[in-house]
Amino acid sequence: MALTVDDIVARCQAAVGEHTPALAVRDVLDEIVTDPAALEQAVGAVHEGGITTLHNAADLTVLHVAWTPGMALNPHDHRMWAVIGMYGGQEDNAFFRRIPGSLEPAGGRELPAGEVLVLGEDAIHSVANSRKDFAVALHVYGGDFFSVERSEWDSKTYEERPRDFERTQRLFDEANARWVTRN
Ligand SMILES: [Fe+2]
């Protein structure tokens, strides 16, 4: 039986009913990312960077995210647990801590294909794709990703501002245009 988006969502929904939802979702993604060909078959081949919503409800959001080569997204929070399962390319995560009026760096993690990262509710991270392939992943969130108020921070000044999705979309558009021009 071929893997489908419905299967992926159903397995995440079942995991959300478990005692430790984020860890249960991690187990689901750990298994799914072991077969990147099946996952690509289910979600479709990636030709440009972007975010595709596979499921969006009050208790669970499942996104397919493809970071364009050369793309970097400034620090932001989610205010809900998140689990990222990479199945192609690599996503470079940098972590931050709040300090009065700013942020301070708090380490990082390179996330290559086949690995899964769990982020707690208060995590603040930036992501970059420094490779020459799309960095493709399932991003699963323990809530309604699109309606919760969140913050983002300027990459250089670390000034906090409300999360702006249109700005994120412009980052994708610019990175996609640069990538198409170069190739
Ligand atoms: Fe994020």
Image (cartoon, helix red, strand yellow):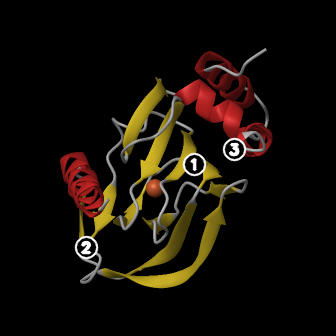
Picture coordinates of residue 40, whole percent (x, y)? 60, 34
Residue at the disc numbered 2: 154
Give the mark nearer the N terminus: 1 vs 3.
3
What is the distance, in whole Å, between disc 2 and disc 3 at their CAs?
28 Å
Question: Would residue 183 appear left or right of 14 to someone viewing this image?
Answer: left
Picture coordinates of residue 160, whole percent (x, y)? 26, 69
Instruction: Indicate whether 4 appears above or below 76.
Output: above
Q: How busy is the neighbourhood of tag 2: few (under 14 within 10 Å), some, or many (20 plus)? A: some
Circle 3: residue type = Ala
SS at badge 1: strand
Give the mark nearer the N terminus: 1 vs 2.
1
Residue at the disc numbered 1: 82
Question: Would residue 45 appear left or right of 70 to someone viewing this image?
Answer: right
Residue 140 vs residue 128, the one in the foreground: 128
Residue at the disc numbered 3: 22
Q: How busy is the neighbourhood of tag 1: few (under 14 within 10 Å), some, or many (20 plus)? A: many
Whether the residues at callouts 1 and 3 have beta carbons within 8 Å, the answer is yes
Circle 2: residue type = Asp
Instruction: Indicate whether 43 appears above or below 93.
Output: above
SS at badge 2: loop
For the C terminus, the image quarter is bottom left
Residue 8 quadrant: top right
SS at badge 3: helix
What is the distance, in whole Å, between disc 1 and disc 3 at their CAs?
7 Å
Residue 163 appears in the figure: no
For the N terminus, the image quarter is top right
